[in-house]
Image (tube, rainbow, N blue to C red):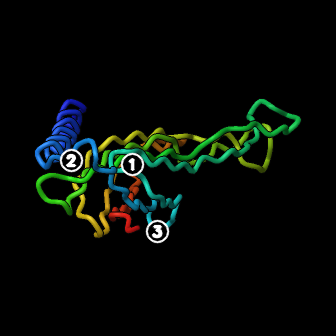
Amino acid sequence: MNMKKIACKSIVALLATFLLNVFAGNASSKTPTELEVSGALLYGNFVITSFADVVRDGATLEASSNTKSRYFADNNKTAKPEPYEHGFTIKVSPLLGFPKPDTVYARITIDGNTVMRFLVPKSRPAGIGRPQLQGINVVSLEKLVEGKESVIGFDCTYVNINDEKPEARNCRYRLVLTVNKHKT
């Protein structure tokens, strides 16, 4: 799905919600609906991060799982570890749908990078060398049903480089997401 379609769908959903409130006569007096958003980012069967919070209808929930790690540089014979950062930032912006009140549209953005493999340092007989990082950027507009768990899958492709021949590999991620109306 390209960015123009995502932008158009977002604008239509916002406009529909606004018009529904205007025609109901409560556009300015109605307090915004609060939504309970919970989810988890998984790689295979491994949980990378989980999140849960209450946000206003149309607001953004942000979660991150960034980690600072170290590796041994190839050219560093004194074995001083070099820092690097990897992980993900997840943004979920839920918006109640129109005309069905149990429909939720969610704009999902996932940015980050993951470690695909490590290169063994030539200057050391053992230890973890420089990581090969794969950038992951996902932007999606999803239609969800309130109270039901939804699974959004996405892939990344990287090339495993060895001395003999490059080899393409796929990695599979899933974002499990649930949105409910907050009961006060």
Q: Nearer the viewer, residue 29 or 93?
A: 29
Residue 124 badge: none
Q: Which residue is mark 2?
A: 26
Q: Real-space Cα distance between discs 3 and 1? A: 22 Å
- Kind of residue at disc 3: Asn
The mark total stands at 3
Ranked by sequence position, the earlier of labels 2 and 1 is 2
**Side of 115 where 165 appears, left or right:** left
How crowded pointer 1 is (Cα within 10 Å; few <14, some 14-19, many 20+) is rated as many
Residue pictured at 51% horizontal, 64% vertical: 47
Question: Mark 1: which secondary structure?
Answer: strand
Q: Residue 174 in the image: state x and y as whole percent.
A: 38, 59
**Callout in the foreground (3, 1):** 1
Residue 92 badge: 1
Ranked by sequence position, the earlier of labels 3 and 2 is 2
In the rendered image, which quarter contains the N terminus? Answer: top left
Residue 45 badge: 3
